[in-house]
Amino acid sequence: MESDVGVEFADRVTVRFDCEDCGKVTEVTMFAEAEIPLVWECQCGKEAVLREHDRPDPTKPVKPQRTHWDMLLERRSMEELQVLLDERLELLRAGKLRRRSA
Ligand SMILES: [Zn+2]
């Protein structure tokens, strides 16, 4: 299991998967923003199926989580970023990024 440190403020949901083969119910806690899989591997090795009741409501608006990367992409296209990266890499390889004292 992963450590819970640092994720206390994230919304989490617990969903249940029923294994038809052995009857075991597997409870899985995941982030509310995460995409909930329809099947989960049961301890017996078979696929447990997500309980109908626990399926995410498709009408519920998903709160988008914007990262710095997302915000960057809103201002620059991938092509622009690639050009900028290439330029910097070229300067770096040519040793031109080192600042010279006047
Ligand atoms: Zn099972």
Image: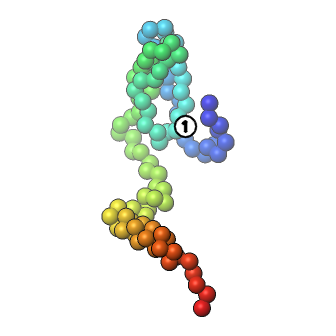
* Residue on which disc 1 sits: 12
Mark 1: secondary structure: strand
Side of 63 where 77 appears, left or right: left
The single residue placed furthest to the top in the displayed view is 22
Is residue 94 placed above or below 18 in the rendered structure?
below
Question: How far from the left and from the top, in percent, is residue 94?
Answer: 47, 74
Question: How far from the left and from the top, in percent, is residue 80?
Answer: 35, 67
Residue 82 in view:
yes
Q: Which of 51 and 69 is in front in this view?
A: 69
The single residue placed furthest to the bottom in the displayed view is 102
Q: Which residue is drawn at 36% across and 68% down?
A: 83
User: Where is the C terminus found, in terms of image quarters?
Assistant: bottom right
Q: Which residue is drawn at 45% across and 27% down?
A: 54
**Residue 60 found in image quarter:** top left
Q: Nearer the viewer, residue 43 or 52?
A: 43
Q: Which residue is drawn at 49% across and 60% down?
A: 68
Side of 77 where 24 appears, left or right: right
Q: Residue at x 40, y 67 (%)?
A: 86
Is residue 12 placed above or below 63 in the rendered structure?
above
Question: How far from the left and from the top, in percent, is residue 100?
Answer: 58, 84
User: Where is the N terminus found, in terms of image quarters?
Assistant: top right
Is residue 6 placed above or below 13 in the rendered structure?
below
The single residue placed furthest to the front in the displayed view is 94
Total marks shown come to 1
Amino acid residing under circle 1:
Arg
Side of 39 where 96 appears, left or right: right
Residue 18 in view:
no
Q: How crowded is mark 1: few (under 14 residues within 10 Å), some or many (20 or more)?
A: some
